[in-house]
Image (spheres, rainbow, N blue to C red):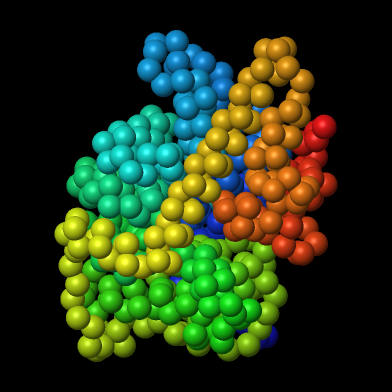
Amino acid sequence: MAQTLFEQLVTMTVAVVDTGDLNSIKKLTPRDATTNPSLITAAAQMPEYAELVDGALRWAETQARGGGASVLDLAVDRLSIEFGLRILAIVPGRVSTEVDARMSFDTAKTIEKGRFLIGLYEAAGASRDRVLIKIASTWEGIRAAEVLEKEGIHCNLTLLFGMHQAVACADAGVTLISPFVGRILDWYKKAEGRDSYPPAEDPGVVSVTKIYNYYKRHGHKTEVMGASFRNLDEIIELAGCDLLTIAPNLLLQLGEHTGTLERKLDPVKAQAMDIPKLSFDEAGFRAAHAADRMAHDKLDEGIAGFAKAIVALEKLLGERQKVTQGRARAGQAAFDFFKAFDLDGDGFITREEWSGTDAVFLALDADGDGKITPAEMAAGVGGAFVLTA
């Protein structure tokens, strides 16, 4: 029997599922899994996870009595950890848990949050070797990761779009980077007025290929995990990358297609390439970032999107807290959540308005028309939304 593309891919690349839905993870059986606030927010609104949400709130209320962080801040962290622990019970490898994107330009707060999250995992019996702290690839975030890595806290540097970010991450000794393939493609399609590119010329594919070859040529141990895919062709062109984090719908498509999958990225071939060594101090990094319009735009947009998702999750938890205390009716925060992403108020959420995680957008966009309606939002989260005027 002919092997599927998925069966061939996992012989050369670690497949990571990009979701917070435990049922999807059980079905797809990846080695690793990644989460972020958008994914946790979507999963937290599913009825089967209601007790998980309530438990996180009860814990946060108890912890907040001692002062310091707010109930909602603590509840977000606790919920992220609870989903992470359940993911670790399913996958044999690692889970990525994200630092609040609003801390992306604050090294000290990022370090503090990374230590706190690892502390919660370890208190629950999970080894820090199975957790990646996910941090935005700002100069400040990279410096925070450098400190955390020296303490044995492994990091996943996300929202990575440029070679300057990749080089700085490798020099800082981070465990893993997540360059965003699809978002790079989005930027170039808009900037160059194109509808598509041949798969091998896809700007996102080209970017990740360059980073991978640079790392292997110069012996960097930092792993490359391509992320944010728009189509199967992007995945096929990056076969051989250390890891690829893929949305459940694309993983399923890989399992449905057969044919020969060629290894495109090869460490042995990369070692023979003529690739100059690069280095960036802070001034050089900031100059390179300012000169790279795509990386500059997409990093800012990504941080804003993840921060928006954190705010949405806090609203959801705040509403749930009021409901459990009998102080409000269910549904209003969900309605506010939809309105927060429907920026122009036309009753649809487009991909650009969403600006959060691609996996969630694709899951909610049931008819694949590039827009999320209130009905699709309600259906996608198991009917948990009660959308009222």
> From what the image shows, is residue 101 above or below residue 157?
above
x and y percentages locating residue 254 in the rendered image: 63, 74
> From what the image shows, is residue 19 above or below residue 274?
above
Give the image quarter of residue 326.
top right
Q: Residue at x 70, y 40 (%)?
A: 339
x and y percentages locating residue 287 in the rendered image: 25, 62
Give the image quarter of residue 114.
top left
Q: Residue at x 38, y 35 (%)?
A: 117
Q: Residue at x 26, y 36 (%)?
A: 108
Image quadrant containing the N terminus:
bottom right
Give the image quarter of residue 120.
top left
**Would residue 41 be visible to someone looking at this image?**
yes
> From what the image shows, is residue 273 above or below residue 83?
below
**Would residue 244 be visible to someone looking at this image?**
no
Q: Residue at x 26, y 88 (%)?
A: 273
In the displayed structure image, the side of residue 384 where residue 192 appears, left or right: left
x and y percentages locating residue 365 in the rendered image: 74, 57
x and y percentages locating residue 205 in the rendered image: 47, 77
Image quadrant containing the C terminus:
top right
> From what the image shows, is residue 286 above or below residue 81?
below
Out of 275 and 94, give the one closest to the viewer. 275
Out of 304 and 256, give the one closest to the viewer. 304
The number of callouts visible is 0
